[in-house]
Amino acid sequence: MEHNARVEPAPDGGAARFGEEAWQKLVSFSEMLSAEGELRGLVGPRELERLWTRHILNSTAVCEFLPDSGLVADVGSGAGFPGIVLAIVRPDLRFDLIETMERRTDWLDHVKQELDLANVRVIRSRAEDMPKRYAADVVTARAVAALKKLIPWTLPLLKPGGHLAALKGQRAEQEIQDAHSQLMKFNAQRADVYDVDVWGSDEGTRVLLVEKMK
Ligand SMILES: C[S@@+](CC[C@H](N)C(=O)[O-])C[C@H]1O[C@@H](n2cnc3c(N)ncnc32)[C@H](O)[C@@H]1O
């Protein structure tokens, strides 16, 4: 596949970091996004210039908050961040990508087929409309909504003792304060912010981790 000149090149050393198979799939995912992402209205042209650092590698920051085994639900996956990236890096975990827009679930299904991601299920739904019995070990979310909205959407999707890991920016602490009553109402045990280094990028990121009561 021909590379778009504006697309940020992949960093060196990815195969050593993520394993050969996962790295090949991450590169293929970047190529699919470069070729089709703009046309399909999934990523803006400026975003292709920072596809690796701002999006693909940024998504990997959630890895250290994933469970040893079980089910991860990525709410509002959009073009596949962080859900597709995490599913590639952790083929031993099951991933449900819960996304409300058909255009985006069509894309996510296409990526699942092309990259042969047997651990991925694409679910077209709003997070808040998922069945009551749904129970994930971890829910992930990036750029979906402020925490006070995310809590009612995502804590009901978690098993007791499960975690919401949301990629957030500088206002993460303020978001926790603003979500105080939702955190109490939906049985959050604690909410903390972690500064995380992102491999291959100079830009770190922040993960807001909410634990649901056991
Ligand atoms: C700004 S995009 C972010 C996409 C991706 N997470 C990322 O970081 O690039 C937000 C996505 O969340 C989806 N979304 C918004 N509200 C949702 C909900 N209640 N349940 C599931 N998906 C939702 C939108 O359709 C959109 O694809």
Image (cartoon, helix red, strand yellow):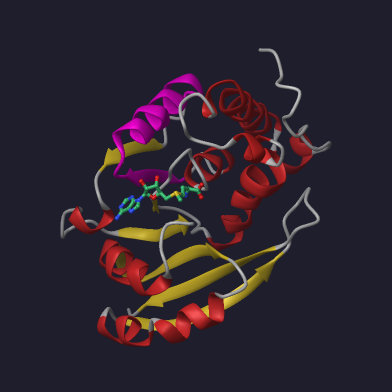
Residue at x 51%, y 58% (from the top left corner): 66
Q: Picture quarter containing residue 86?
A: top right
What is the count of numbered marks?
0
Q: Is residue 112 magenta?
A: yes
Q: Picture quarter containing residue 183?
A: bottom left
- Identify whether 85 is placed above or below 61: above
Residue at x 66%, y 26% (from the top left corner): 24
Q: Where are the magenta residues, as a range?
A: 93-116
Quadrant containing the N terminus is top right
Front in this rendered view, residue 85 or 202 = 202
Residue at x 67%, y 48% (from the top left corner): 54
Q: Position of residue 63 (x, y in %)?
A: 59, 55
Q: Position of residue 162 (x, y in %)?
A: 38, 68
Q: Position of residue 11 (x, y in %)?
A: 80, 38
Left or right of 196 in this view: 99? left
- Identify whether 171 is placed above or below 25: below
